[in-house]
Each structure stands twice: as structure tokens, then as C-alpha cells.
Image: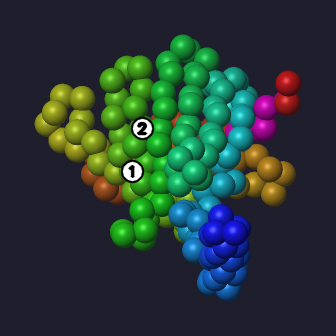
Amino acid sequence: MRTLLILTLFVSMQLMAQDEAAQSPATPAPCSGEKYHQFDFWIGDWNVTSNGQLAGTNSIHPILNGCALQEKWQGASGLAGTSFNIYDQARDQWHQTWIDGSGTLLELDGGLRNGEMVLQGDRPTADGTGMTSHRITWTPNTDGSVRQLWEATQDGKTWTVLFDGMYQKAAAN
């Protein structure tokens, strides 16, 4: 009889706990707000061309419970690289850290402007005597493709195109 009473009490407590949980407002999942998904148009597996020639392939996928995007680039010339992209709620902006097989580190910050993701950052020149500002703009197109325009300047006025690529979804295997 005592065992039955303890079992009944245990089941009653479990049911009350479930009832309280059902009545409490659900805690939103981390990184579920709208701003965390502003760069989702870039997610996918892509063939990338520049000037009509294959520049490489790129794979962009959510990681860490959807809190970040990881890019995995494989250039047609053999250069590989990766980036991590995250919406930084504390600074209310997007951040990208890019690294590649040539030792390049590029850190960019910015956000969505007029439907385009625009990230910008400074990097020392190769000879170490100055700084180069880099600006990369990703534009989603109505046909599902994405244009990536990478520009650089040393004087803050004259921008030079370093890469102008068109992303087309890769065919599913």
C-alpha cells in the first residue's frame, strides 16, 4: 500500500510539472530572431563563376544550432578557404572571419543594406606600410543566384574590384 501511495504521489507530481510547463511561455530557441537569418539567402552548395569562367565551388551551411554559417570555398586554382559568419546581437551587426590556405585572415563587419549583405574591414597591406579596406557585397537575385562583389581601397575613395562572382545552385547529387 505504501508503495502504491508513493507511486501515485510521484505520478501526480510529474503531471503537475508537465501542466506548469505547458502553461509557461516557451523560451525562444537561441539565434531564432529575424536578424539571425538575414544571410540565409547564401545557404547552399554553389558553383561560382567570374567573367564566365568557373572560379570554384562554395558550400555555406548553418552550424552550432543555426547560430552561425560556415563557408567552405574550393577555388578552381586550388586555393581553399573557410569563413565563419554570425549575427552579433550585442553589436547589432554581422561579422565574418575568413581564413585560407595562403595564410590570409580577413575580418569583416556590417549588415543588411537595401536587401544586400555588406561587410567591410581593414587589413594591413602586404608590405605592412599601410591599410587596405575590403568591402564584400552579397546580392540575392530573383532567380535564386547570388552575386558576390569584393572591392578594396587604400585611399578610401577609389575602389578596385578584386572579385566579381556569380553563385548558381549546384545540382543535387
Q: Is residue 84 left or right of residue 28?
A: left
Residue bearing mark 1: 108
**As shown in the figure, which amino acid type bears the numbered disc 2?**
Trp
For residue 28, above or below residue 23: above
In the picture, the quarter occupied by the N terminus is bottom right
In the picture, the quarter occupied by the C terminus is top right
Residue lying furthest top:
78
Image x and y of residue 74, in percent: 58, 23
Residue 111 seen in the figure? yes
Looking at the image, tell me whether mark 2 or mark 1 is earlier in sequence order: 2
* Between 43 and 112, the one nearer to me in the picture: 43
The stretch of residues the image draws in magenta is: 167-171
| SS assignment for the magenta stretch, majority | strand
According to the image, what is the colour scheme of the structure? rainbow
Residue lying furthest left:
129
Which residue is pictured at 56% across the width and 58% down the height?
117
Image x and y of residue 147, in percent: 66, 47
- Disc 2 to disc 1: CB gap under 8 Å: yes
Q: Which of the 4 quarters of the picture holds residue 41?
A: bottom right
For residue 26, above or below residue 136: below
Image x and y of residue 34, in percent: 61, 70
Q: Residues within 10 Å of mark 1 (few under 14, many from 20)?
A: many
Q: Is residue 156 left or right of residue 124?
A: right
Which residue is pictured at 71% across the width and 41% down the height?
44
Residue bearing mark 2: 98
**As shown in the figure, which amino acid type bears the numbered disc 1?**
Leu
For residue 72, above or below residue 164: above
* Between 67 and 108, the one nearer to me in the picture: 67
